[in-house]
Image: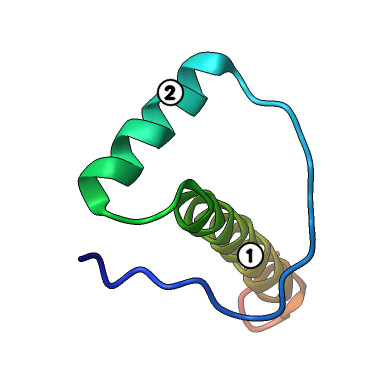
Amino acid sequence: MSDKKPHGEKERFTTTLNSEIIEEIKILAIFERCTTNVLIEEAIEDLLMKYEDKKMKKEKKRKVDQNPFFNKD
């Protein structure tokens, strides 16, 4: 059995997805022995981390650009 476990308080969230993606998620869930919901939550968490990383990099670059020590002018 997969070690992927749902966590936290749950709230219903309804959306529509491409039918091919739905089919692939269902097949993956069978192979991973978990629910489609667990896989979708994992994908969304990964997406949020990706954008948080981008945000952190932009913020770090902004701080470096504003720092006179790093400014080559």
Up the image or down, 24 lies above or below 50; here it is above
Residue 52, label in figure: 1
Tell me the residue at 20%/66% (across/down). Answer: 1
Q: Residues within 10 Å of mark 1 (few under 14, many from 20)?
A: few
| Disc 2 packing (10 Å; few <14; some 14–19; many ≥20) | few
Residue 9 in the image, given as x and y percentages of width and height: 71, 79
Image location of residue 4, percent across then percent down? 35, 68
Q: Residue at x 25, y 51 (%)?
A: 32
Q: Is residue 20 visible?
A: yes
Numbered disc in front, either 1 or 2:
2
User: Could you tell me which secondary element the residue under label 2 belongs to?
Assistant: helix
Residue type pointed to by label 2: Glu
Which of the numbered marks, if any, corresponds to residue 23? Answer: 2
What residue is drawn where x is 64% and y is 81%? 8
Identity of the amino acid at label 1? Glu
Question: Residue 15 location, x and y as percent?
Answer: 76, 35
* Residue 70 position by quadrant: bottom right
Query: Upstream in the sequence, badge 1 or badge 2?
Result: 2
